[in-house]
Amino acid sequence: MPLPVIANVYRCAFEWVNDNQTSWRATNVIHVSKSGSTPAAVYTALDTNVTANMWRQTGTDSHIRYVVITPLDGSSVSLSTATGNTAKWSGALTPGDMISQGCEIVKFKTAKRGRNYRGRVYLPWIGESTVANNVITAGNVTLSQTAWGAFFTAMVAAGFQPVVASYALSTAEAITALEVETNIATQRKRNRRP
């Protein structure tokens, strides 16, 4: 399915790797909106504002190696930028045993109701040390929630509005709230409706 055309919206794909499990790959996608911007400017804003506590759930041996930014204008090419595996693009935990299929969920809400107006990212490879009985410890959830909130606030201040992009409707709505869930989960693919 081709990407939709949504004016002034950029698809930002965070491509994860793990140093010890070289076959593991994961990708998180968020969207931002800014009129008259460029993929390079979007990357600069992301790189300026991300922090390691956003990826607090995983070890320092897991990294977002590339960020691929695609303008949803229907014609421009994507920009793939290597992060350099710096600390702010890597997990925050001491490497150790991880729950390979477990994810920490960050949910995004907009002012509108319905599945086309909600978003989420499934952050991969939760360290076992951060979980008890399938629940992420409160301190880690708080640090992650604070980091994601600060990131969104800083992106808005820089003029890059985080949005939920509906590919079905070819629309984008500003994110008004976010929540880091306490229970770990696994990602399942949605059934596409005609």
Image: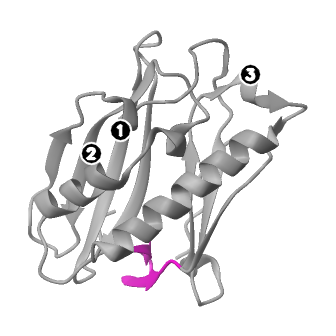
- The residue at the point 11 percent across, 81 percent down is 36
Whether label 2 touches label 3, CB < 8 Å: no
- For image coordinates 40% across by 82% down, the residue present is 172
- Per the model, the C-alpha gap separating discs 3 and 1 is 24 Å
Q: On the image, numbered disc 3 is attached to which residue?
A: 129
Task: Residue 165: say if magenta.
Answer: yes
Tell me the CA gap for discs 1 and 2: 6 Å
Q: Is residue 139 above or below residue 75?
A: above
Q: Which residues are magenta?
A: 162-175
Identify the image quadrant of residue 113: bottom right
Q: Are marks 1 and 2 in contact (CB under 8 Å)?
A: yes
Looking at the image, residue 17 lies above or below residue 34: above
In the image, what residue type sits under mark 3? Answer: Ser
Q: Is residue 38 above or below residue 55?
A: below
Q: Is residue 167 left or right of residue 118?
A: left
Mark 3 or mark 1: whose residue is earlier in sequence? 1
Q: Which mark is residue 67?
A: 2
Q: Nearer the viewer, mark 2 or mark 3?
A: 3
Q: Amino acid at mark 2?
A: Val
* Circle nearer the N terminus (2, 3): 2
- Between the residue at mark 2 and the residue at mark 3, the CA separation in whole angstroms equals 28 Å
Instruction: Please tell me whether the stretch drawn in magenta is mainly helix, strand or loop.
Output: strand
Quarter assignment of residue 12: bottom left
Which residue is more in the foreground, 133 or 145?
145
Name the residue carrying label 1: 15
